[in-house]
Amino acid sequence: MAETFRLKIIAPTGVFYDGQVERIVLRGCEGEFAVLAEHTPLTTILAVGTFNMILGDNQHKSGTLLGGLVTVTPRETIVLTDAAEWPEDIDLNRAREAKERAEQRLKDDKFDAARAQAALERAIARISTKEK
């Protein structure tokens, strides 16, 4: 069995996940990266996107992180996020409607483009997580 490390994912609503994992793949601002036990210390900003964990015994679990910050040490990784969701908690129809609304707002000059782009990224991440 591969070596594990402690992973904590903390959202404003509380602890989303706290347990041992073999690996987690996160989406940073410069692309995806994996964290394994004994990883070199690192602190970086996370982008909106899907995360994938290997818990051990070939068990996989995925979810969505809506941005945040990660701090990695050799024995522990802590993710502070604006929000985290498991696939079963995502309403696919609602995410698709949010995506359509954001795309329409990006076409219309009277809406804040940055806010619409952020909404679009969140909707796409939720759809991607749910459809995997």
Image (tube, grey):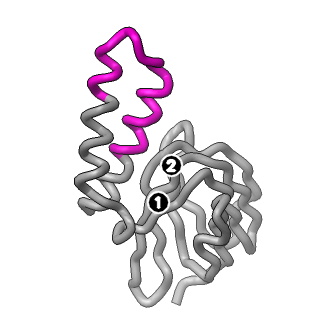
Disc 2 to disc 1: CB gap under 8 Å: yes
Question: What whole-number distance in Å separates the C-alpha atoms at marks 2 and 1?
Answer: 7 Å
How many neighbours does mark 1 have within 10 angstroms: few (below 14), some (14-19), or many (20 or more)?
many
Q: Position of residue 71 (x, y in %)?
A: 73, 57
Q: Which mark is residue 27?
A: 2
Q: Is residue 115 above or below residue 88?
A: above
Q: How many marks are shown on the rendered structure?
A: 2
Q: Earlier in the sequence, mark 2 or mark 1?
A: 2
- Name the residue nearer the viewer: 78 or 113: 113
Disc number placed over residue 51 in the picture, else none: 1
| Residue depicted at 36% across the width and 67% down the height | 87
Mark 1 falls on what kind of element? strand
Q: Residue at x 37, y 9 (%)?
A: 109
54 relative position to 99: left or right: right
Magenta highlight on residue 115: yes
Look at the picture and state if 120 lies above or below 45. above
Tell me which corner region of the image, top left, top right, bottom left or bottom right, holds residue 107. Answer: top left
Amino acid marked by disc 2:
Arg
Identify residue type, mark 1.
Answer: Phe
* Bounds of the magenta segment: 103-124
Relative to 72, residue 28 above or below: above
